[in-house]
Image: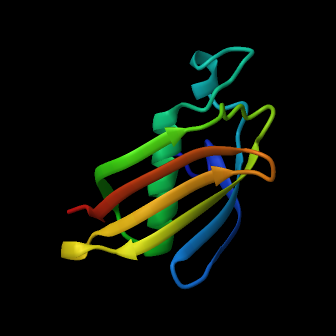
């Protein structure tokens, strides 16, 4: 939905439980016309969708979030000031074929988002 339009993946990697993505936000995307002109702020729901989409890139399956136990937006993600960010997803297998995911959006100086959520394959 947002990949390759709102953001693009510049780099990706992984180790045993962690997925690493460097992404670039499109500061000219139409979302920012309403959120907000001349002071763009990446909506929280968009950041949450990016997490799901990046997880789907790795798993090659459509997923849906079934619960979220924690979500903290720690700093404003303005694409004019921070259009390149790193996303780290720590993924663990849960019960009933679910994925427990701890997500972090950050750059070298700022953490923008920390979220703990659970996903399952969408039917």
Query: Quick check: 71 above or below 41?
Result: below
41 is higher (above) or lower (below) than 10:
above
The quadrant of the rendering that contains the C terminus is bottom left
| Residue displayed at 46% across by 46% down | 49
Circle count: 0
Across and down, in percent, residue 113 comes to 57, 45
Decide which of 121, 94 is in the foreground and name it.
94
Left or right relative to 41: residue 39: right
Figure colour scheme:
rainbow
Rendered image quadrant of residue 87: bottom right
Describe residue 34's horizontal placement relative to residue 79 as left or right. Answer: left
Q: Residue at x 66, y 31 (%)?
A: 76
Q: In the image, what residue occupies the spot 22% across and 74% down?
A: 95
The residue at the point 51 percent across, 79 percent down is: 17
Name, please, the residue furthest toward the bottom.
16
* Residue in front for this viewpoint, 48 or 123: 48
User: Percent x, y for residue 108?
Assistant: 80, 53
Residue 118: image location, x then y, percent? 32, 59
- Residue 1 visible in the current orientation: no
Percent x, y for residue 44? 50, 35
* Residue 3 makes an appearance in the image: yes
- Going by the image, does 85 lie left or right of 108? left
């Amino acid at each position: 939905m947002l990949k390759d339009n709102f953001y693009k993946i510049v780099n990706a990697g992984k180790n045993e439980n962690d997925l690493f993505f460097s992404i670039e936000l499109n500061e000219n995307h139409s979302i920012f016309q309403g959120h907000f002109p001349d002071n763009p702020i990446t909506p929280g729901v968009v950041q949450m969708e990016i997490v799901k989409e990046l997880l789907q890139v790795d798993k090659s399956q459509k997923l849906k979030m079934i619960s979220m136990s924690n979500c903290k937006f720690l700093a404003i993600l303005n694409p004019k000031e921070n259009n390149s960010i790193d996303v780290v997803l720590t993924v663990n297998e849960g019960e009933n074929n679910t994925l427990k995911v701890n997500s972090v959006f950050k750059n070298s100086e700022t953490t923008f988002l920390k979220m703990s959520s659970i996903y399952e394959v969408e039917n």
